[in-house]
């Protein structure tokens, strides 16, 4: 039974603090008053964020 024991070590070192942006930022969309998180690096809220498509590797995307 003692043969199946896994051993590990504690992670050493300190973790880096998350990057923070200025407080009181709002969405860049005209008329939108949504406050952005201090950890959100984007300029728009989720509802107004421009569409981003994932990188497709090895696949041809058909044109519409």
Image (cartoon, rainbow, N blue to C red):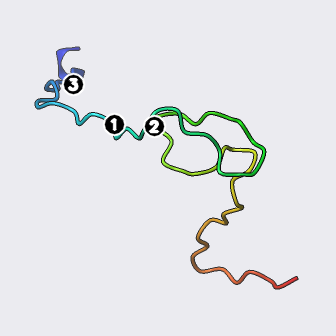
Q: Mark 3 points at which residue?
A: 6
Q: Which residue is drawn at 61% across and 40% down?
A: 26
Distance from Cα at disc 2 to Cα at disc 3: 37 Å
47 sits left or right of 41 in the view: right
Rendered image quadrant of residue 60: bottom right
Choose mark 3 or mark 1, whichever is in front.
1
Q: Which of marks 2 and 3 is nearer the N terminus?
A: 3
Q: Nearer the viewer, residue 63 or 43?
A: 43
Q: Residues within 10 Å of mark 3 (few under 14, many from 20)?
A: few
57 sits left or right of 29 in the view: left
x%, y% of residue 45?
Answer: 66, 44
Q: Nearer the viewer, residue 36 or 5?
A: 36
Q: Nearer the viewer, residue 43 or 6?
A: 43
Q: Which of marks 2 and 1 is nearer the N terminus?
A: 1
19 sits left or right of 30 in the view: left
Look at the image and tell me in which quarter the C terminus lies: bottom right
Q: Residues within 10 Å of mark 2 (few under 14, many from 20)?
A: few
Distance from Cα at disc 2 to Cα at disc 1: 7 Å
x%, y% of residue 34?
Answer: 69, 35
Distance from Cα at disc 3 to Cα at disc 1: 32 Å
Q: Residue at x 45, y 37 (%)?
A: 39
x%, y% of residue 6?
Answer: 21, 24
Q: For the residue labelled by badge 3, is the local secondary structure a helix, a strand or a loop?
A: loop
Q: For the residue labelled by badge 2, is the local secondary structure a helix, a strand or a loop?
A: loop
Q: Name the residue under label 2.
A: 39
Q: Name the residue under label 1.
A: 18
39 sits left or right of 30 in the view: left
Q: Residues within 10 Å of mark 1 (few under 14, many from 20)?
A: few
Asked if the residue under mark 1 is in contact with the one under mark 2, i.e. CB atoms within 8 Å, the reply is yes
Q: Residue at x 66, y 63 (%)?
A: 52
Q: Which of marks 3 and 1 is nearer the N terminus?
A: 3
């Amino acid at each position: 039974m003692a043969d199946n024991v896994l051993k590990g070590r504690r992670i050493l070192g300190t973790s880096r603090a998350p990057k923070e942006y200025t407080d009181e930022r709002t969405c860049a969309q005209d008329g939108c008053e949504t406050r952005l998180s201090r950890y959100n690096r984007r300029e728009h809220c989720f509802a107004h964020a421009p569409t981003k498509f994932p990188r497709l590797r090895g696949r041809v995307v058909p044109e519409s």
